[in-house]
Image: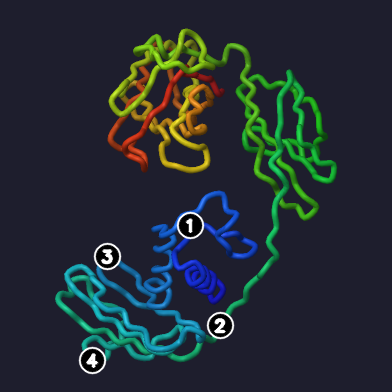
Amino acid sequence: MNQGLASLYRAAGLFLTNKENMVAENGDFRDTAINSDRQLWSVAGNLAMIYRVFYGMNLESDKLSFAPVVPEQYQGNKILSNFKYRDAVLDITLNGFGNQINSFKVNGKEQSQHFVNSNIKGRHKIEITLNSQIKDQGKINAKANHFTLKTPRVSLNKNSIIIENYNPSANYQLIANGEVIDKSIESKFTINLPKIYTEYQVAALDSLGYQSFLSKPLIYIPQGHEQILQIEKFAKLSTLPYEGYNGKGFIELTKTKNTDVKIPVTINKDGLYAISFRYSNGSGPYNTDNKCAIRSLIVDNNNEGAIIMSQLGKDEWSSWSESNSQQVRLKKGKHLLQLKFLPHNENMNVDVNRALVDQVKITKLD
């Protein structure tokens, strides 16, 4: 606890704001991928140390209870004024240090139970005195900062997987559909091509056994297991001058254009299918900003979940990628897909929720 509190207060004291991120090695805000001042989640974490830790507040359905913990280094008299709790305003004084309550007074009267009821009204004064000791100090298993190996870059050539940034000192594992199937692989190796949709990934492990991020999935789709439809057949073709699309072109999705794209499809076999979209989003950089395009996938009038079309780079409208997929069990026959903008598909930007869509992909998984 002391280390966590010190990390927060040191950063706030040094930088005079609640930064978004810090470097694990030294606590500095420089050299992070992104950072901002006055980040609300960082402010919330700082406030939580007061409300949740020092004062030990727990907001329950029928009461506000207190179980304070104050390390000796933070002892003293603390005053929390004008704390609004439902129909009441509380002035709360916290004295001493420790993790047990010696005295709990409400408006000067001692209480054996350390809470106030949810129906309390008006202004009240609470005074808490702690026991001046913490018997079980606990231990910190402090470890030196450690970086994993670089994420493997892999490619699939027929039935061979190649690790393009192979490190001879690392151990590599092969994962298929989330399960490790080979615990020791070389820079190039062959696989037995399966009869069903399979996602392969590679992980690098260092000498201490720490695992890297998994590689970008290599997707193997058996012949006849994927249906690709040009989406411009189902909505107005865009005249925007971007490249890299398939077929005759693409459609544009905004908050006012193509808000409900209806796509009739025919399924040849019963089964579990993944539905995804080939898209472009050049509204902003790939690692920050808040202009992700979000739509709902409706299948036969059932909302199957969100389709996420993240930013691919500022003005990179000729770069294309694959959205997430939603898995839907479909019967043989005709079905209606809808790519629809609904109220809950708003993003953090609110004004810009835009993408270009090239294709819809329907892939049989079983």
Along the polypeptide, which appears first: circle 2 or circle 4?
4
| Tag in front: 2 or 1 | 1
Tell me the residue at 50%/82% (across/down). Answer: 71
Along the polypeptide, which appears first: circle 3 or circle 1?
1
Q: Amino acid at mark 4?
A: Gly
Q: CA distance from mark 2 to mark 4?
A: 31 Å
Q: CA distance from mark 3 to mark 4?
A: 25 Å
Q: Amino acid at mark 2?
A: Asp
Q: CA distance from mark 3 to mark 1?
A: 32 Å
> Circle 4 sits in a helix, a strand or a loop, which is it?
loop
Along the polypeptide, which appears first: circle 2 or circle 3?
3
Residue for badge 3 = 61
Task: Measuring from the top left, give residue 313's x and y in whole percent.
Answer: 51, 33
Picture quadrant of residue 202: top right
Tell me the residue at 57%/81% (across/down). Answer: 137
Q: Amino acid at mark 3?
A: Ser
Q: CA distance from mark 2 to mark 3?
A: 30 Å
Q: CA distance from mark 1 to mark 4?
A: 42 Å
> Circle 2 sits in a helix, a strand or a loop, which is it?
loop
Along the polypeptide, which appears first: circle 2 or circle 1?
1
Picture quadrant of residue 241: top left
Disc 2, disc 3: CB below 8 Å? no
Residue for badge 1 = 20
| Tag in front: 3 or 4 | 4
Q: CA distance from mark 2 to mark 1?
A: 33 Å
> Circle 3 sits in a helix, a strand or a loop, which is it?
loop
Task: Measuring from the top left, give residue 327's x and y in whole percent.
Answer: 47, 28
User: Which disc is residue 136 wearing?
Assistant: 2
